[in-house]
Amino acid sequence: MNFPFTAIVGQEELKTALILNVIDPGIGGLLVMGEKGTAKSTAVRAMAELLPELTVVQDCRFHCDPAGDLCSVCLDKTADQTLTNGKKRMRVVELPLGVTEDRLIGTLDIEHAIKHGEKRFEPGLLADANRNFLYVDEVNLLEDHIIDLLLDSAAMGVNTVEREGISFTHPARFILVGTMNPEEGDLRPQLLDRFGLCVQVVGLHEKEQRMEILRRKAAFDNDQKAFVDLWQKQQQDLAGNIVTAQALLQSVELSDSALERIVAITAALHLDGHRADIVIMKTARALAAYRRQTTISNSEIRDAALLSLSHRQKRLPFEELGSERGKLLRVLEESLS
């Protein structure tokens, strides 16, 4: 039994960023920077448990969505039979630091294919992660080629393994959550850019908040079921709000006025490429849906930019460490006034 998501004290940016990625997984995941012991993994596990069950293809090892992309096995089945639906809960799949390429993407048994004329695919962690959360602690310590494979799969939503002219494909649509402590090493800028949102987390310093953490932790440890029952109403309300936002998402208007304001922000910050613009747009739209609005206001654009741009800003030579935040706030004030 996991600690309830709504019972987590503070860390509002982290919780909001997770909620927005659930509303629109196309945002591109979340990078969490900061110290240990700040409820990062607790929040991810609690979010997975909060969400309603998913509809999946019964007995599919890849949890395929019957109304979405299918793996090679399910595609073959559709040729002569109707797929049976089942239900499953989302879960958190953890990626260990020493993971190998085969363990990540899976392997094809070439000998079996040659002898028997059929594919035998041994799924990797990306198969387990499909339609789940993929949690990578200390992502900055992974080998670069593993990070590249991970981010490519996250961006494309599919994993294709090819060996000796034989290939196997399965969907790999997961919500990627990576954590890192910048003091232990950085990610290359081009890899940072591949994470949709980024939040900085620190321990809470206010005395009453720290005391409340202890109270709730003690109550949870003393009687988990009673504590979870106490927060059931808040959990159900939040789950309902997320489902409503998912249904409303495509109805949120992407007006030229809103797009112009987004582009004004990224242009003023001289950001490379167009990924930042796209992420702000998607995040602002998800925020509007979560707030039950059909139009994007300055408030959504500002909040979306703060979540989307902190890890994409460039620090010029001789600029003070941490000056990016102040520059971003100034640009937002000028662009949205």
Image: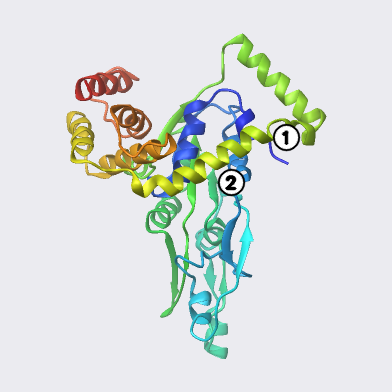
Percent position of residue 258, x then y: 23, 36
Q: Position of residue 311 (x, y in %)?
A: 35, 33
Which image quarter: residue 82? bottom right
Count every numbered label the image shows and give the total. Answer: 2
Residue 187 position within the rendered picture, expressed as x and y whole percent measured from the top left: 39, 39
Q: Are marks 1 and 2 in contact (CB under 8 Å)?
A: no
In percent of width and height, residue 277 lies at: 26, 40
At label 2, the amino acid type is Leu
* Amino acid type, mark 1: Val
Task: Determine whether 121 is above or below 265 in the image.
Answer: below
Q: Residue furthest right?
A: 222
> Label 2 crowding class (10 Å Cα cut-off): few <14, some 14-19, many 20+?
some
Label 1 sits on a secondary structure element that is helix
**Residue at x-position 76% and y-position 24%:** 218
Q: Would residue 316 appear left or right of 112 to someone viewing this image?
A: left
What's the residue at 49%, 75% (across, down)? 72
Query: In front: 93, or 215?
Result: 215
Q: Is residue 5 above or below residue 110?
A: above
Q: What residue would you read off at disc 2?
A: 51
**Dot 2: what SS?**
loop
Q: Which mark is residue 228?
A: 1
**In which quadrant of the rendered view does residue 103 lie?**
bottom right
Find residue 337 and name its label. Answer: none
Assign the N terminus to one quadrant of the image: top right
